[in-house]
Image (cartoon, rainbow, N blue to C red):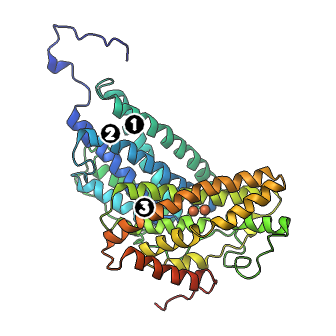
Amino acid sequence: MSFPPESIPPDVPETQIIDEIDIDSNRRLLNRYRYIEQRSMRVLAGWLAKAARFELKCEIGRAIWEDSLHVNGLYLRLREIQSPAFQNPADPALLRLMEEILHAPNELALAVAFWRVLKPALCAAMEKHESTTFPNSDLPSVYAIAHILLDERAQIARIEKLLVQWEAERRFDSAVAPWADYIHALLRDAGGITGEATRPAAPAIAPAVRRNFVPPNEAARDERFTNAETVAGIWGNTPNEADYGEHTSWEFERYSTEMLAAETIGLVMFQMTAVPITWEFFYDLARHLYDEVRHGLMGYEWMTLHQHDPYKAPQALAVFRWRSQFTPVEQYGMLTMGNEANVFPYRLRRLEAHRQLGHRLNEQFVRYDMADETQHVRFGKRWLPEMLKAVGEPRSLKQFTKEILEVWHEQYATGKYPLQAE
Ligand SMILES: [Fe+2]
Ligand SMILES: [Fe+2]
């Protein structure tokens, strides 16, 4: 807009000059976008471990984090114009859409529903919003929307490239199209993203391809991972740290499997949406989740650079299988207070070894990892008490932590992984 703003001609009646979105419509719309982004996080977190195609799994992880930033941007604006800031939209059709999208028949149907149906519609609605709200009076909304659009357009473009490739490789099965049609129909039932479009008389009926979502207890990997079940090299036959070259290869191969941590956090986030806990918990865990995807990719980057095939790395999928049998608080407690809190003496030794031998890339990777891991231990310390409260855990934090660490030492740190009978 120009500055100073163009003055309103005095002879135009006020009723004729307000084409912009009024403040009540504005908060209703922002709340719908926020709800869609927040429920998307839940759905994608639930699906992270179930998605096998590696590139899609990485994109899902990134989308969970980016969407958390979008929810937060909208929350920061919404809390200025409505109280409480988080409210379920008063539109059962929109609630139905964001529940149904979870029950996709497979990961590619899920991806098409999100990045060819829902997210493009969300972008179109926000683009219109950006240009039709009061440009000055509502500038904070414009700011939030402009930044979200930047991310969402890039997210759609990245994933579209993958979808085109997978379609050409004939990876889409016959469930993909009817599922995408169903999600389209549910969106129409909700009057579109804005809720303002004319709604069909009869609501959409779920197609036969719909699969009731079951939270994962297995971490899926695509066919390129030839050692998905192998645990080798984690316990027992770790190369000696004194043998720098061999140990460093092992060290970065281990990084390449950190998707397992991201998958556990995805499951924890999904499970925790069922209990009352503050938004900031999901905001932090979304970042924690995506950090672990990045650590995994750091391992891939290192291995590829050193002519090692990351798809041949042992994936130790038993770790996810084992962790997923515990409650979400136990899973997050063992990850942050077991795996992450205990890794620092080892990382510091590696950092020193890389530095002394002048391996700058190795040193940089470990330093970035340690910066992230420091945050992750903080997340554990910050959120475990809140999680215990939210789930109504009777044990004190001290007792709870002591007991889960006993299990962690006995079962995980020794690589014994006993699975409780069903
Ligand atoms: Fe990590
Ligand atoms: Fe971590």
**Residue at the image position 39 percent from the left and 46 percent from the top:** 72
Say what amino acid the circle numbered 3 marks: Arg
Circle 2 residues within 10 Å: few <14, some 14–19, many ≥20: many
**Residue at the image position 29 percent from the left and 53 percent from the top:** 94
Give the number of the disc on residue 399: none
- Residue contact between numbered discs 2 and 3, judged by CB atoms under 8 Å: no
Given residues 250 and 47, the one toward you in this image is 250
Given residues 50 and 202, the one toward you in this image is 50
Given residues 205 and 218, the one toward you in this image is 218
Front: mark 2 or 3: 3
Q: Which residue is mark 3?
A: 382
The quadrant in which residue 381 appears is: bottom left
Give the number of the disc on residue 77: 2
Task: Give the percent coordinates (x, y) of residue 117.
Answer: 44, 49
Q: Is residue 69 above or below residue 202?
A: above
Task: Give the percent coordinates (x, y) of residue 362.
Answer: 76, 55
Give the CA distance from mark 2 to mark 1.
8 Å
Secondary structure category for the residue under label 3: helix
Front: mark 3 or 1: 3
* Image label count: 3
- In this picture, residue 117 sits left or right of residue 26: right
* Sooner in the amino-acid sequence: mark 2 or mark 3: 2
Task: Give the percent coordinates (x, y) of residue 403.
Answer: 46, 82
* Residue 90 makes an appearance in the image: yes
- In this picture, residue 145 sits left or right of residue 290: left
Q: Which residue is mark 1?
A: 144
Say what amino acid the circle numbered 1 marks: Ala
- Residue contact between numbered discs 2 and 1, judged by CB atoms under 8 Å: yes
